[in-house]
């Protein structure tokens, strides 16, 4: 995944502030948390888990690159 894809995963622009990135991460993590969709069945839960992992990875790498 390229650097640009990490920002796209969180739904923000590359020039977004640190606060905007953190807010976007929290929003996406809340949306795709596997426990939020547990009532929809295991198929939906697995999909949400994959997306949740991508969101976490993107946020961690953006933080690391920005020195946060």
Image: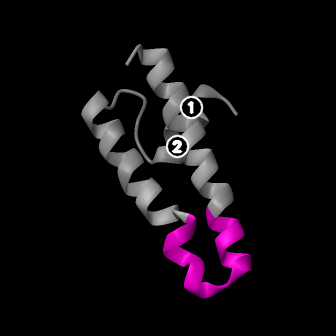
Extreme residue in the top direction: 67
Q: Residues within 10 Å of mark 1 (few under 14, many from 20)?
A: few
Q: Identify which residue is drawn at 45% across, 65% down.
A: 31
Secondary structure character of the magenta stretch overall: helix
Left or right position of 35 against 12: right
Looking at the image, the residue that sits furthest to the bottom is: 40
Q: Is residue 58 left or right of residue 42?
A: left
Q: Position of residue 10 (x, y in %)?
A: 47, 45
Q: Which disc is residue 29 wearing?
A: none
Q: Quadrant of residue 34?
A: bottom right
**Quadrant occupied by the N terminus:** top right
Q: Quadrant of the C terminus?
A: top left
Q: Is residue 35 above or below residue 14?
A: below
- Magenta segment boundaries in residue numbering: 34-48
Under circle 2, the secondary element is helix
Relative to the observer, which residue lies in front, 62 or 33? 33
Where does label 1 land, which residue? 4
Q: Is residue 35 magenta?
A: yes
On the image, numbered disc 2 is attached to which residue? 8
Question: Could you tell me which residue is drawn at 42 percent across and 16 percent down?
Answer: 66
Q: Is residue 4 visible?
A: yes
Does residue 1 show up magenta in the picture? no
Residue 13 at x, y percent in the picture: 40, 36
Q: Residue 27, relative to residue 18: is it above or below? A: below
Residue 17 visible to an observer of this rendering:
no
């Amino acid at each position: 995944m390229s650097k640009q894809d990490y920002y796209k995963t969180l739904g923000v622009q590359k020039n977004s502030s640190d606060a905007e990135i953190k807010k976007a991460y929290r929003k996406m993590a809340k949306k795709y948390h596997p426990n939020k969709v547990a009532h929809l069945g295991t198929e939906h839960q697995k999909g949400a888990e994959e997306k949740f992992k991508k969101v976490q990875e993107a946020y961690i790498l953006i933080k690391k690159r920005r020195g946060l």
